[in-house]
Image (cartoon, grey):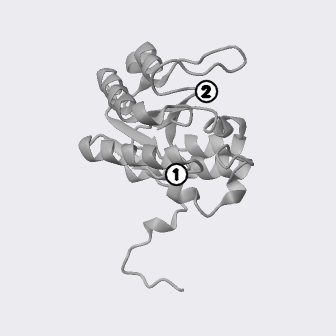
Amino acid sequence: PKVQQATLIGDSVADAIVQTSTAVAEVKREVNLSLQVAPCRRVEGDSCPYNGVRPPNVIDLVQSLGSAVGSNVIVAVGYNDHEDTYAQNIEDALSALDAAGVKRVFWLTLRAARHPYVTMNAVIEAAAAKHPELTVVDWNVYSRSHPDWFQSDGIHLSGAGALAMAKLIHTSLESAGIAAPDRKSTRLTPVTSRSRM
């Protein structure tokens, strides 16, 4: 099967993946992956400045990439966004992604270290209920019992956290049939076989 293209759009949290070679290798396995990650990125509106530069927000980035964004996009953005506009931001981002020809969108929930992120995660879930092309990648639940994956702010990632996020993204792409499953994966065992507990 042809290797599919995917674009990961992220902010400073996902930036840890870019900084961690094992995480990059993990998330790129069996996928032609483009990494579009910049600290301070927002979904919509002006991104916050980082080292004097405001990165393009998700919508501007998607519009500038056009069809080059590919048919599969992973969004790991939201920590710099505003709770009260996040629902509309997601709608606007999905419209921009659709206009660029994106077929599947994987949106990571936010680690609920601060209260607004709880609300924003509910907004992501609600958007997925309305948009069949949108798949929720539940980073919040996946990372819940792993404080060691995070820096002291409970949001930004350690090296182990970067690898964990990369694995979760890759698993989501596998489940959607976008990345070929790992040959060594135990999930390929037939369900009829008795597993030794």
Q: Mark 1: which amino acid?
A: Trp
Percent across and percent down for residue 121 are: 44, 47
Give the quarter of the figure containing the C terminus: bottom right
Residue under the point 36% across and 80% down: 192
Residue under the point 57% across and 51% down: 167
Q: Secondary structure at mark 2?
A: loop
Q: Nearer the viewer, residue 190 or 137?
A: 137
In the image, residue 140 above or below residue 71: below
Q: Nearer the viewer, residue 61 or 49?
A: 49
Asked whether residue 66 appears in the rendered view, the answer is: yes
Q: Nearer the viewer, residue 7 or 42?
A: 42
| Tag count | 2
Residue under the point 40% across and 53% down: 175
In the image, residue 28 above or below residue 42: below
Percent across and percent down for residue 184 are: 55, 62
- CA gap, disc 1 to disc 2? 19 Å
Which is in the foreground here, disc 1 or disc 2? 2
- In this rendering, position of residue 167 left or right of residue 22: left
- Mark number displayed over residue 121: none
The quarter of the displayed image where residue 59 is located: top left
Percent across and percent down for residue 52 are: 70, 14
Q: Secondary structure at mark 1?
A: helix
- In this rendering, position of residue 171 left or right of residue 35: left
Question: Which residue is identified by label 2?
Answer: 40
Asked whether residue 179 appears in the rendered view, the answer is: no
Whether the residues at callouts 1 and 2 have beta carbons within 8 Å, the answer is no
Question: Which residue is identified by label 1?
Answer: 139
Q: Mark 2: which amino acid?
A: Cys
Badge 2 density bin: few <14, some 14–19, many ≥20, Cα 10 Å: many
Q: Earlier in the sequence, mark 1 or mark 2?
A: 2
Give the quarter of the figure containing the N terminus: top left
The quarter of the displayed image where residue 106 is located: top left
